[in-house]
Amino acid sequence: MDRRQFLLSLALLGTPLTKPRNRRRAGTQNVALPPLTLSPPPGSYTGEAQRLTALIFGRFWDANVGMFRAPVRSAETVDSDPPHQNGYTFWPSLLAFHTLVEGEKIRRGRYKARMAQVYRGLEQYYDPQKHAYNAWRHFPGNNDTYYDDNAWGVTTLVAAYEATGDAAYRDRAQQVMEGFVSGGWDPTDTPGGVRWGTDPTKPHTADKTASATAGAALAALGLARLGIHRASNIAWAQSALTWLQRHLQDKDGLIRDGLQAPTWTVMPTKWTYNTGVPIRAYVEHYRLTHDPASLEAAKRLARAATDRNKALYDQLVRDPERRFFYDSSFFVHYLADGLLALYRVTQDAALLDEVKRNANYAYAYLRDPTDGLYFRNFRLWRIGEAQYQAWRRLTGQEHRREPDAAERSQADKDTRLPVSARPLVKTLLANAGCARLFWLLAQVQTVPHPSS
């Protein structure tokens, strides 16, 4: 299953599209629910971020081959030669690197050496001819490369430079942006946007997606913040954000997933990151230009994104006070990033409170107390029996279990079993997403950093 097929499979399993889902799908129990109280991690967001970051590297980092690997085959891993078997693809590996960057912003010097070590490992994915990171380790003829991965790579590398002063990160960010990411932009507006991937043999790579277009806009603005082609990068980002508004913003104010080739029909799914990354990009544009229209655009997106009656929340839950973001930790942190960036500018406490609320929910329900690692799904009925029962107690409702295969072992012996019978596993992408979420909250309680 490729990345787009994976996302589409999630969309078919109860994902909100353009309207809230039919609330009659889940019955209610005739019980009075106690007041909902969710506490932050007892050691503070900083403490939980540090703890989880350490666990990630203890569980997933293989220093012998310089890459992240899973103990068993699971979501995001690749079958390969023995040293690299169950190695992780570039996106989760980049996100794990990003957790170190976020930690380095407020714990100067603590993660710098580890960042350099992981960055060297990421070179295995880098294609110097394309000036881009492949989805898997580079080899001659590998054309499986994605514009959204590389746009996020640019943003992460810019932040790494700002956190450490190491010019290697800045220079690579510029190489990837100018040598690859900008080439994905269609200037014709027919349909325009940034395409998703490069390999024509894989489905959906020609789609023009919100993730690639918004990610590229944010990447360009990061380089502009460093003074690299400031005027042209700001102008280019503005064009990309305008395209998103014109082609992918729905009437409810949220950003849809993209335009599907070759007919350019709208893909209606609304992931949290589809709206979160544009919020962050508009805030960056405002910081660089002081254009009030960009700040207002960010505010409008944030209002839509934090409306519990709209599609970014699990509309299966009847009580809005018990609704949380509906998708997964590896998407939610992008929305948190946008909302917290806007909070820094506006000091609108409601934005900070909503991010804290969802982070506290993740700590309470996605964290497995047996090993301290996190599951992927914010929809608890998609994980295991314990999480399903917790959802019933939380909501006072009944709903069928829909176990997610991505939460479970994909070893050959296990895939012969029904999904619900396969062992639960923890993934790098899930835990890096949660770690970054906690680091982002830790940063708003410390000295602000320019790339925060």
Image (tube, grey):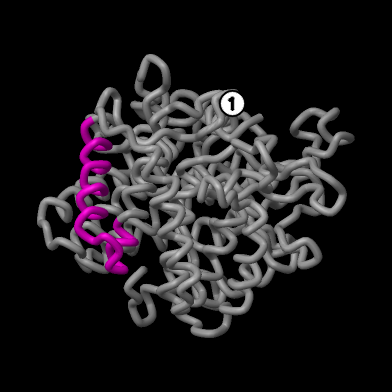
Foreground of the two, 405 or 23: 405
Indicate the quadrant containing the C terminus: top left, top right, bottom left or bottom right: bottom left
Q: Is residue 205 left or right of residue 292?
A: right
How far across and how far down the image is residue 238, in percent?
21, 47
Give the quadrant of residue 7. top right
At horizontal 63% and vertical 74% (from top left) the residue drawn is 114
How far across and how far down the image is residue 301, in percent?
25, 46
Is residue 231 covered in magenta?
Answer: yes
* Magenta-highlighted residues: 221-246
Look at mark 1 in the image and give the residue it sits on. Answer: 202
Residue 228 seen by the camera: yes
Q: Measured along the vertical axis of the image, is residue 60 above or below residue 385? A: below
Q: Measured along the vertical axis of the image, is residue 324 above or below residue 192? A: below
Foreground of the two, 211 or 164: 164
How far across and how far down the image is residue 374, in percent?
64, 56
Q: Measured along the vertical axis of the image, is residue 25 above or below residue 384? A: above
Residue 26 seen by the camera: no
Foreground of the two, 371 or 257: 257
Give the quadrant of residue 248. top left
Amino acid identity at mark 1: Lys
At horizontal 25% and vertical 33% (from top left) the residue drawn is 252
